[in-house]
Image (spheres, rainbow, N blue to C red):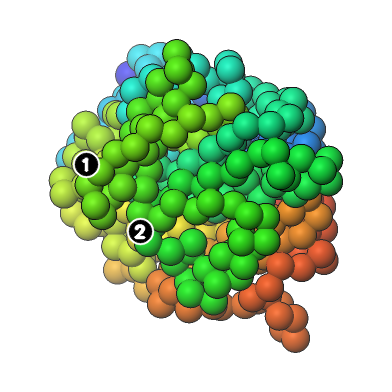
Amino acid sequence: MTTHHDFVIIGGGNAGISVAARLLRSGERDIAVIEPSLTHYYQPLWTLVGGGRARAEHSARAQSQFMPAGARWYRSWANAVDPESQKISLTDGTELSYRVLIVCPGIQLDWDQIPGLSETLGLDGVSSNYSYDLAPQTWEFIRELQSGTAVFAMPSGPIKCAGAPQKIAYMAADYWRSQSRQNDIRVVLVLPTPAMFGVPVYAKELKRVADGYGIEVRLSSEVVEVDSANREVIVKDLVADTKERLEYDMMHIAPPQSAPDWIKASPLADPNDPRGYVEVNRHTLVHSRFPNIIALGDAGSTPNSKTGAAIRKQAPVAVANAKLALAEKAPNAFYSGYASCPLVTSRNRMLLAEFDYTMEPTPSIPFVDLTKERRDMWYLKKYGLPALYWHAILRGRA
C-alpha cells in the first residue's frame, strides 16, 4: 500500500528538520520526514574535535529531540523516486506518494575515489574530521607527532564546509608552535583551487595566516593516491598535469564528495553533472523539470558553498516555494547564494567569511572588521553557533 502526504522531506539533517519545523509553524500539517538515523550530529564541531578543542560526544544528540512534533517520521532510507507518479520507495519496502517533495539527503563521502585511502584511514597517522569516529583520532595524531611531515589535503569539486581542510592545518600548526615543535614539523597544505579562498579579501588574510605558520601551500593540486606502505601520497599538479610523491608522517584528508548514489541514478540528478546533484534553479531551489520538487542543502546543484549557513538562508525560501507548489503556483521566493564559512585560524582565533553568488563579502555583523582573524569570532564558533543550531535553527526559528 502507498501512504500519501502533502509534503515529503527526504533527509532529517540540518535542512530537513529545519524545513519540517518551518512548515509546521506556517500551518501545514501533513508532513513526512524520511531519516534512518537515531542520532543527529552538529558536524561543524568536528573541526574543533580534531583540533583538541571540543569533545565528539558534544556534537551528537538523539534525533527524537529534534524531529518536529506533528511530522510523521519514517525511519528508513529512500532509495528511488518516480517524479511522474510522484512516489518514493524506501529500503524497508514502504512506498510514499506526495504532492510536494523536498530533497535534502545530505552529501556522500567518496573515500574510495582516492586509491589507497580507505584501508589506511585511522591508521599510521591518517585521519579525517569528516567522520565522527575519526575526528578524535585526528587530535591523537596531532598530539603524538614530534617531527616529520604533516600533509593536509582537500579534493577538487564541491565538498561540505570547504574551509575544513584548511582549519585543521592551522589548528595543528598553532598547537605544534605552542609545544615548540614548529621547526621540527614540515606542514604542507594541498588545495585544488588557484587561490586560498574564492573571495580575494579572505584569500589574502588566509595567505598571511599560512605564511605566519610557515605552511607550504600547494595550489591547484590534489592528492590522487595514498601509498600507505611507504607512507607517501601522490600529489597531482592540476595545471601542469604532473605528479610528485610526498612523504607524510601524519595526514588529514577530506574525501571527494557527491550526491548519494541513488540520487545520481534517479531522474532528479543533473544529467550534466557527474556528481549527480539534484538539478534545481539556483535562486528558487525548484527542480528544473519537476515544479513540485525542491532541493536544498548539500545535495542540491546550487553553486553556493555547501555550509550550514547556506541552509539557514535556503530553508525559508524552500518553505515559501514549497507552499506555493502545493497551491500549484509559481515560486516567488529567492535565495541569493549566501554562505558563511567560519575559518578557524588557530586554537583561539577565527575568520568569519560571509559571501553570496557575487563572491563579494556580505558581512552580517555591523561595525566589526570581519576580513581579519579575531578572538571574539572564536567564541562565536565554539559556543554561539552550536547554541543557535540546537535551540533555534532546528526549531525553525532562525
Image coords of residue 251 (percent x, y) = 56, 32
* Snapshot quadrant of residue 114: top left
- Residue under the point 50% across and 53% down: 217
Left or right of 210, for residue 109: left
Q: Which quarter of the rendered picture does the N terminus lie within?
A: top left
Q: Residues within 10 Å of mark 2 (few under 14, many from 20)?
A: many
Left or right of 266, for residue 227: right
- Residue under the point 31% across and 47% down: 237
Q: Is residue 183 above or below residue 328?
A: above
Q: Kindly state the secondary structure of the residue where label 2 is placed.
A: loop
Left or right of 39, for residue 246: left
Q: Is residue 277 above or below residue 111?
A: below
- Residue under the point 56% across and 65% down: 207
Q: Residues within 10 Å of mark 1 (few under 14, many from 20)?
A: few
- N-terminal of the pair, mark 2 or mark 1, is 1
> Of the residues shown, which amino acid type is indicated by label 1?
Pro
Q: Nearer the viewer, residue 54 or 239?
A: 239
**Is residue 347 visible in the rendered structure shown here?**
yes
Name of the residue lying farthest toward the front? 183
Image coords of residue 350 (percent x, y) = 72, 61
C-alpha separation, residue under disc 2 versus residue under disc 1 = 15 Å
Image coords of residue 254 (percent x, y) = 49, 37
Q: Nearer the viewer, residue 164 or 334?
A: 164
Q: Kindly state the secondary structure of the residue where label 1 is placed.
A: loop
Q: Nearer the viewer, residue 44 or 392?
A: 44
**Residue 302: mark:** 2
Q: Which residue is mark 1?
A: 274
Q: Nearer the viewer, residue 216 or 315?
A: 216
